[in-house]
């Protein structure tokens, strides 16, 4: 049978219908500290059960599931960590991502998809009010505490772009969250002062991170709604990281005009976004991200580069460059108020 006439298979259907099982097993393993226990030298079910305060049967079945889907290896009766699991799921690793599940698998995130058919009919979230976009929503504290390790690679890339050439001395970090992006710039540039905008409880997390990074004396907070606050002026650079996708184009353009007014004449904006190709179905991660926004926001989506470039141009930024971030699902746009500025 030729490749173009393959036998139909229900494999994708069952993988997708049962995808919640992977999420549940991963969360259980993180809650039990299973990956950390294996990193510490426990490998067989009996030892893992004792270390994780669980049953031998339960641990064995959980480990076999995780080995089947690629999080663990199995040799005889013992289980080991894959390189990715050792790097990201051992609680003692500086790149530990387990905390991100508090945000990614939160009840509110899942509730948006429980009502996804209603969101498709409506064209926006079916959750009450604005969902997580309501003012001071506690979900964003979970985001700030759990998601910073996922942003390390992008933060380093952004800091490299920001400090290459003429480093900024005053940076506006919008929807700063954990603060990783502005903090990384401050670490690399001793002359940089960061002004971070977000909800008050979220900014407490960013301030903690700035203190740990040794840049607290150059880290200022501006609590409130980014669409309503007076940012002031005199900024050399603004950061817009994982923010524009929450809003419809007119709202984005309105915010960008505010940012434009706050920047110096030669100022620039660095934007981090899930940016699909122009076909809107590739690469998979940014292409699928629009569904997350449909489930949880009134008008947000993952925008293509041409769509984002159009918004920036409408707001007064004529120069817009797209940058890839190897190993990350997001892309970066550098936008400038003046043509020819590098």
Image (cartoon, rainbow, N blue to C red):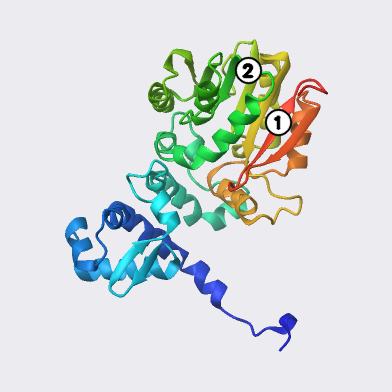
Q: Is residue 106 above or below residue 171?
A: below
Query: For the point 35% across and 50% down, which residue is it?
Result: 90
Viewport quadrant of the C terminus: top right
Residue 303 found in image quarter: top right
Along the viewing direction, whichever of 189 and 217 lies nearer the viewer: 189
- Locate residue 79, reporting x and y percent: 32, 66
- Locate residue 309, reporting x and y percent: 76, 35
Q: Which residue is mark 1?
A: 334
- Locate residue 177, reporting x and y percent: 48, 30
Viewport quadrant of the N terminus: bottom right
Question: Residue 168: which disc?
Answer: 2
Question: Disc 1 on helix, strand or loop?
Answer: strand
- Sequence-wise, the earlier of marks 2 and 1 is 2
Q: Is residue 177 above or below residue 190?
A: below
Question: Residue 62: which disc?
Answer: none
Q: Is residue 160 above or below residue 1?
A: above
Question: Disc 2 on helix, strand or loop?
Answer: loop
How many numbered marks, from 0 up? 2
Query: For the point 41% across and 59% down, which residue is it?
Result: 23
């Amino acid at each position: 049978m030729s490749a173009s006439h393959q036998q139909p298979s229900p494999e994708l259907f069952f993988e997708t219908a049962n995808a919640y099982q992977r999420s549940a097993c991963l969360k259980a393993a993180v809650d039990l500290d299973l990956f950390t226990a294996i990193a510490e030298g426990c490998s067989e079910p009996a030892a893992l059960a004792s270390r994780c305060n669980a049953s031998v049967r339960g641990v064995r079945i959980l480990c076999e599931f995780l080995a089947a889907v690629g999080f663990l290896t199995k040799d005889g009766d013992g289980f080991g960590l894959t390189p990715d699991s050792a790097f990201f799921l051992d609680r003692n690793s500086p790149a530990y991502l387990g905390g991100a599940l508090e945000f990614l698998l939160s009840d509110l995130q899942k509730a948006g998809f429980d009502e996804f058919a209603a969101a498709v009919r409506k064209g926006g979230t079916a959750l009450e009010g604005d969902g997580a976009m309501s003012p001071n929503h506690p979900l964003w504290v979970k985001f700030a505490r759990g998601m910073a390790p996922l942003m390390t690679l992008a933060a380093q890339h952004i800091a490299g772009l920001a400090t290459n050439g003429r480093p900024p001395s005053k940076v506006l970090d919008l929807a700063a969250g954990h603060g990783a992006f502005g903090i990384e710039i401050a670490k690399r540039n001793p002359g940089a002062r960061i002004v971070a905008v977000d909800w008050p409880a979220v900014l407490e997390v960013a301030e903690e991170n700035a203190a740990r990074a040794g840049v607290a004396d150059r880290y200022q907070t501006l609590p409130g709604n980014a669409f309503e606050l007076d940012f002031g002026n005199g900024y050399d650079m603004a950061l817009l990281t994982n923010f524009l996708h929450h809003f419809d184009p007119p709202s984005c353009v309105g915010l960008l005009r505010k940012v434009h007014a706050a920047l110096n004449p030669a100022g620039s904006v660095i934007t981090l976004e899930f940016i699909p190709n122009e076909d809107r179905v590739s690469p998979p991660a940014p292409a699928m991200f629009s569904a997350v926004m449909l489930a949880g926001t009134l008008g947000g989506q993952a925008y293509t580069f041409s769509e984002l470039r159009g918004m920036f141009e409408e707001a007064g930024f004529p120069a817009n460059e797209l940058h890839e971030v190897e190993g990350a699902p997001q892309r970066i746009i550098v936008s400038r108020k003046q043509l020819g500025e590098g």
